[in-house]
Amino acid sequence: MKKLLTVMCTFLTVFLACPVGVWAAGNGGTGSGVPVWLCIPFAGLLLCVAVMPLVKGEWWESHQPVVVAFWIVLMIIPFAVVYGAGKTAETVLECVINDYLTFIILLFGLFCVSGNITVEGDFAGSPRVNVGLLALGTLLSSCIGTTGASMLMVRPVIKMNSWRKRKGHIMIFFIFMVSNMGGCLTPIGDPPLLMGFMRGVPFFWSLHLFPVLIFNMVILLFVFYHLDMRSYKKDISEGRKPDISKPGTEFKIEGLHNIIFLVMIVVGVILSGMLPGMPAFQDAAGNVKGLHIFGEVTLGLPSIIEIVLILAAAFLSFKTTDKRIRVRNHFTWGAIKEVAVLFIGIFITMQPALMLLKAVGPNLGITEPYQMFWATGALSSFLDNTPTYLVFLTTAGTLGFTNGIATTLGTVPVKLLSAISCGAVFMGANTYIGNAPNFMVKTLSDENGINMPSFFGYMAWSICFLVPVFIIDMLVFFL
């Protein structure tokens, strides 16, 4: 009965993932030209991610590639019937080559490099230490990206709390803050802001969001401290103690030279955003030069440079680091394999949903900052937050404002741009699939014996702790 209830609740959650206004604006596929029923494979895959680990866990772990392939095929065949084989091939290849490929290589590079850095010492996972780690990781996210900070910090956090029994909440708040909110201050922090920078938003404009970030950090760290203190006291009362062999405070980092390779990856990401606007990387028509794949699909030279830099960083990291560091980090390939399989399915099957959003987004009547905040955030929780951000940034640029940030899409008021940016970056924390590192942190936590909640269970945490914070954000900053 409990599993049936979970299935029903999850189905309702996935159905509500796209606001009613989007479906209504689609007019059943006649108004937007995108049939709504093409989104069924995407919803089906989300249901599998949410429900299968609960009802058939072992089968799901061994058959994920088969299930993902099933939903991909179930999307591609009807899509080809509606749009033709050529359009389908272009859509899938564009998604795989210019979205998924750079996404998974970035994740792979950061996963490899961070796995070669280990933190040793006698710090125990107490509430104060954990608050400090979360605060550090959150601020670090804007320097090396949410994915980079998550992969760098997740293993030390897991290791310092390995002696504790009750620690699932630590990783949940880690996802809330380090994997999402912390990326709001620079274009390096999260891909949506990088896309804004490429369209004329000043590089350091995102620092305007610092008061919002600090405000949210204070609230969430206050709540986390008291939750963690309660769990910490229960662990202590049961006789659990941290394994600290020596008195004092010893602390050392091994594999520190890998910071060079992290910087190398960050440089690759920055270049991928800056180079397309340079004349040297454009042809006579103003298109980005690159390797032609099929039809209109081209792998741009900036993307190729980014990929080469990231793979070189990963290779050099492995070549220059003692494998004993990876052993101490319990390094395995399981997490990156699972993310690679699941997200290829998510990226491909969500294409009709993104097409629908792009078609109806400007007609939804969303013009106020608080509306932009919730609309961008709600859709970013389930869809890729980068195209969602671009849809609403484009919408804001067409509203005819004369005061604000001048972008290539039009002038956007600061308050409106802040709302779109915060919605895209913050609300990726609402689900495991809302942002790239969320599922990675979840998988690494599972591998290390941390009892993480299910897809729907995690959403219960985000609804309970994040949504009230977002409501306060709306009242304080976006009304």
Image: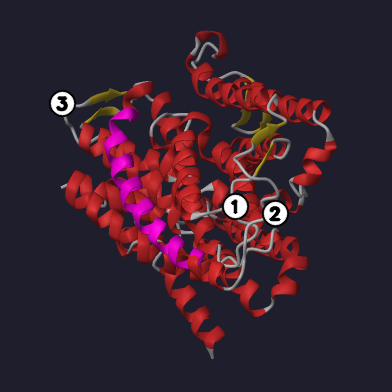
Which residue extends farthest front? Answer: 247
Distance from Cα at disc 1 to Cα at disc 3: 43 Å
Badge 1: few (under 14), some or many (20 or more) residues near its Cα, within 10 Å? many
For label 1, the residue is: 441
Q: Are marks 1 and 3 in contact (CB under 8 Å)?
A: no
* Quarter of the view holding residue 265: top right
> Which residues are the magenta region?
206-232
Q: CA distance from mark 1 to mark 2?
A: 16 Å
Residue 341: mark in rendering: 2
As drawn, 242 above or below 394? below
Task: Give left or right: position of 106 versus 12.
Answer: right
* Label 3 close to label 2 by CB (< 8 Å): no
Task: Tell me the mark number nearer the camera, choosing from 1 and 2.
Answer: 1
Classed neighbour count for the residue bearing mark 2: other residues with Cα under 10 Å, few (<14), some (14–19), many (≥20): some
State the residue at coordinates (51%, 71%): 234
In percent of width and height, residue 239 lies at 61, 70
Mark 1 vs mark 3, foreground winner is 1
Judge from the rendering whether residue 57 lies leftward or rightward of residue 434; answer left or right: right
Look at the image and tell me whether residue 383 can be seen.
Answer: no
Quickly name the residue at label 3: 402
Where residue 263 sits: x, y (%)?
60, 23
Q: Where, by quadrant of the figure, is residue 415 drawn?
A: top left
The percent coordinates of residue 401 (x first, y second) are 17, 31
Quadrant of image for the N terminus: bottom right
Q: Which mark is residue 237?
A: none
Measure the C-alpha gap from mark 3 to mark 2: 45 Å
- Residue 14 in sight in this render: yes
The amino acid on which the numbered mark 3 sits, given as a three-letter code, is Thr
